[in-house]
Amino acid sequence: MARSNLLSCLEKNELLNQKAVSIDKLLDWGKRYEESGLINDAIDFYERAGAPERIEGLLGVVQDEGDAFLHGRILKILGRDAPAADWIAVGEKARELGKEAYAREAFKRGGLNKPEVEKAETGGTKSTPIG
């Protein structure tokens, strides 16, 4: 979907901040943003619509993208914690994709200590969480 079919930043904020807005409309916009690959924006609409199942459906997407920050945001919205192994997997994917800040965040959230994070960042042996 072309981005020209999406809302401007102002239009998006106005819609999300309306007191009375149709849940179907919010879900529709969330789907449009999701299909456009704008996951952060999709989460905004799904969260406003009160659609945790849609947000949970994005968890795999952000994990595959190595996006530690959206991974954390989704977990916070859902009121859940992820096991250390999930965070480390996100970190390894982020590192593979060259997203060093994302990798550091994921490794830290996975409970790795500083030497283990440095080893993971340089492609050393697989790191293990702190016990």
Image (cartoon, helix red, strand yellow):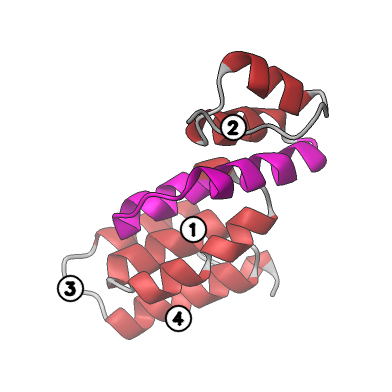
N-terminal of the pair, mark 2 or mark 4, is: 4
The location of residue 99, given as percent across then percent down, is 72, 35
The answer to whether residue 82 is magenta is yes
Q: Is residue 85 visible?
A: yes
N-terminal of the pair, mark 4 or mark 1, is: 4
Element under disc 2: helix
Task: Name the residue carrying label 2.
Answer: 107
> Which residue reaches farthest bottom?
24
Task: Name the residue carrying label 3.
Answer: 20
The location of residue 77, given as percent across then percent down, is 33, 55
N-terminal of the pair, mark 2 or mark 1, is: 1
As measured in the structure, the alpha-carbon distance from the residue carrying label 3 to the one carrying label 2 is: 41 Å
Where 124 sits versus 91, above or below?
A: above
Task: Name the residue carrying label 4.
Answer: 28
At x 73%, y 46%, the residue is: 93
Element under disc 3: loop
Asked whether the residues under the numbered discs 2 and 1 touch, taking CB atoms below 8 Å apart as contact, a structural biologist would say no
Which residues are drawn in magenta? 70-98
**Of labels 4 and 3, the one closer to you:** 4
Task: Name the residue carrying label 1.
Answer: 41
Asked whether the residues under the numbered discs 2 and 4 touch, taking CB atoms below 8 Å apart as contact, a structural biologist would say no
